[in-house]
Amino acid sequence: MLIMEQEDNELTPPSKNIDTDRVAMTWSENLENMLIEWKMTCESVSTIHFKRSKRKKRIHYVLSIPCIFVPLFMSFTNQFFGEEHVYTSYMNSVGYLISGGLIGLSTFLDYSAKYVLHEVASSRYVEICLEIDSCLIKKRKFREKADVIIERLKNKIECLNKYSISI
């Protein structure tokens, strides 16, 4: 019982909270310049992701749209020329090879998912830029403490760099 009382005394918090005496980092020109550099870096990475997204989307359409029209063309020519035409079997074989090859290539390279991931990464970097802008637009006395904002932004940027699709 005596041991339990000692443990209870150790677990009770002190009457004065230690965290209230913390001195926060104040804003300076160097910190603001650092945030501006982070913003410019995020803007450039966002632009790269946006361009990659458009490129992957274009490739996705180039591989996917013929997969729709080649079978339609094959069915039209089979109806128009009939089964007795000399080149019907060759047309069907070539059409199936083209369509199957493009579908296989599109599935294997998975450009549809890649362009979406690049779009998401681009928009998330833009969100960080907007957060930096919203922080820097306020006067220094109305901002959150510098260390809190810098830590939050640093964690977001590191998380994005780690988990977003590679450039």
Image: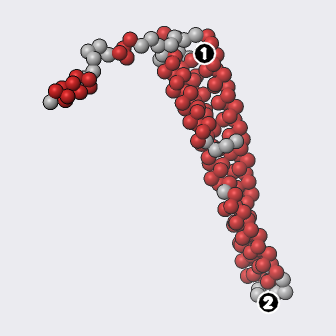
Q: Does dot 1 land on a helix, a strand or a loop?
A: helix
Return the x and y of residue 140 as percentages of the image width and height: 52, 11
Q: Earlier in the sequence, mark 2 or mark 1?
A: 1
Q: Is residue 29 left or right of residue 90?
A: left
* Front residue (pair 111, 162): 162
Name which quarter of the figure residue 88 lies in. bottom right
Instruction: Name the spot of residue 56 as percent of width and height, x first.
Output: 71, 50
Q: Nearer the viewer, residue 82 or 36?
A: 36
Query: Amino acid under label 1?
Result: Glu
Q: Looking at the image, which residue is at 62% across and 53% down?
A: 113
For residue 115, the mark is none
Where disc 2 sits, the SS reads loop
Q: Residue at x 62, y 12 (%)?
A: 30
Q: Which mark is residue 32?
A: 1
In this view, 161 is above or below 87: above
Return the residue found at the far right: 86
Q: Is residue 142 visible?
A: no
- Decide if residue 135 is in sight here: yes
Spatial separation of the CA atoms under disc 2 and disc 1: 78 Å
**Which residue sits at x=70%, y=66%?**
104
Residue at x 75% of width, y 81% of height = 78
On residue 84, the disc is 2
Q: Nearer the viewer, residue 10 or 163?
A: 10
Quarter of the image where the C terminus is located: top right
Quarter containing the N terminus = top left
The percent position of residue 158, horizontal first and vertical second, equals 58, 33
Q: Residue furthest front?
A: 2
